[in-house]
Amino acid sequence: MATLTFMTHTIFDHGASAQLGQVLAQHGIRRPLLCTDRGLVSLGMVDDLAAGLGNDAALSIFDGTPENPTQMAVEEAVAKYREADCDGVVALGGGSSMDLAKAVALAVTHEGDLIEFTAGLGGAAKIGQVAPLIAIPTTSGTGSEVSSGAVIIMNNGEKLILASRELVPRTAICDPSLTLGLPPHLTAATGMDAMTHCVEALLSPQVNPPAEAVACDGIERGIREGNLLKAVQDGSDEDARWHMMMAATEGAMAFSKGLGSVHSMSHACGADQSLRLHHGTLNAVILPTILDFNRDHVGDKYARLNAAMGISADSDPADFIRNLNAELGLPANLSEMGVQADAVPALAAHAAKDVCTFTNPRPCSAAEYEELFEKALA
């Protein structure tokens, strides 16, 4: 039996962020909490957004989002939400700010510890209506603005998934202009995050042909049409930025049919707060290892993947991604990112429990994850 799921109302184009005031009014939000990070505050993006609202909304700001959002940061934002008597949440930033905002929208409307609502503990069934949420991405990567999931490092140190249709933002405002001038390394890393979403969604064994078509379109925009490289090489390329934001949105639409072991391994590595590793970079580095691992378990999908990337049907997609990562200036392996060999057993145990493992084309045990981490380190 197939389950076909797509998500939310999306306003998409250069300049779309100017419609925030109108969107807030549509959802009856008068006192929003803006969840963002200090970098965007220092760039003036928050001031620009607030100026566009005028006196129509009393905006409170939480700018303490870490690179990998934590339950502790969520609790700090919840305290600010309640102190200001907020009635909705706006996420401005990359995947971290959007995931944190989703957790805030959940926490202010539900009693209990946040970990009780995580997917691995059957938490989706406990999630009812959350505070109204608007999402405005400033990177082209996670696609969290149109997805039902959020990834949070819990107080016990595990990086876990919250997942429910209730966590889908009421409206996504996708303004590619907000990504103009994003540094090349972040453009590359977030872009490969989007590409990994598309690739893993395509390869997931769940039955959802429309999602696979969306995934292929995202891969074509990012890789075959060269928009990822164009955006990295020229941060002011408006057309490339438009297509990369669309590819990121498509990646999240596509992974409604599941992700895979790339994300399981990335979540494990990202849980180490001492390393503060970027999720998109992790996905890019790990992707070739999992493409090798899944090779004989995907039917004809590697030919479809190669067609979407614009390479011959008999080419090795893992080698192609390795070469693309090098061209984008991304690390060649996990060792270059600071992951140590002695961490492998704990990383493997974390990855084996991650819910993304269950939609990988090839089953993967903790022992197999140890081997995969060792390969990804080399």
Image (spheres, grey):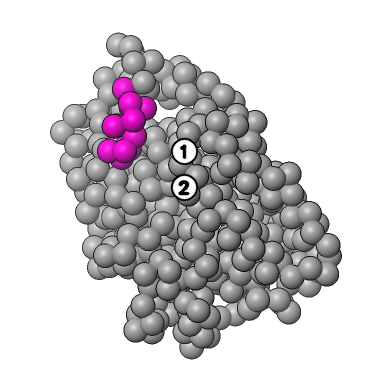
Q: Secondary structure at mark 2?
A: helix
Look at label 1 and name its amino acid.
Answer: Leu
- Residue range in magenta is 35-47
Question: Relative to 194, is 2 above or below?
Answer: below
Other residues around mark 2 within 10 Å, as few (<14) / some (14–19) / many (≥20): some
In the image, is 17 to the left or to the right of 69? right
In the image, is 176 to the left or to the right of 86? right
- Residue at (41% x, 57% y) in the render: 278
Look at label 2 and name its amino acid.
Answer: Leu
Q: Which mark is residue 186?
A: 2
The residue lying toward the viewer, choosing from 161 and 37, is 37
- Residue at (51% x, 75% y) in the render: 376
Other residues around mark 1 within 10 Å, as few (<14) / some (14–19) / many (≥20): some
Are the residues tagged 2 and 1 within 8 Å (C-beta)? yes
Residue 300 at x, y percent in the picture: 81, 69
In the image, is 309 to the left or to the right of 30? right
Image quadrant occupied by the N terminus: bottom right
Majority secondary structure in the magenta region = helix
In the image, is 279 to the left or to the right of 229? left
The residue lying toward the viewer, choosing from 31 and 109, is 31
Question: Relative to 200, is 98 above or below?
Answer: above
In magenta stretch: residue 43: yes
Q: CA distance from mark 2 to mark 1?
A: 7 Å
Q: Secondary structure at mark 1?
A: loop
Residue for badge 1: 182
Looking at the image, the residue that sits furthest to the right is 313
Question: Relative to 289, is 119 above or below?
Answer: above
Residue 319 at x, y percent in the picture: 68, 69
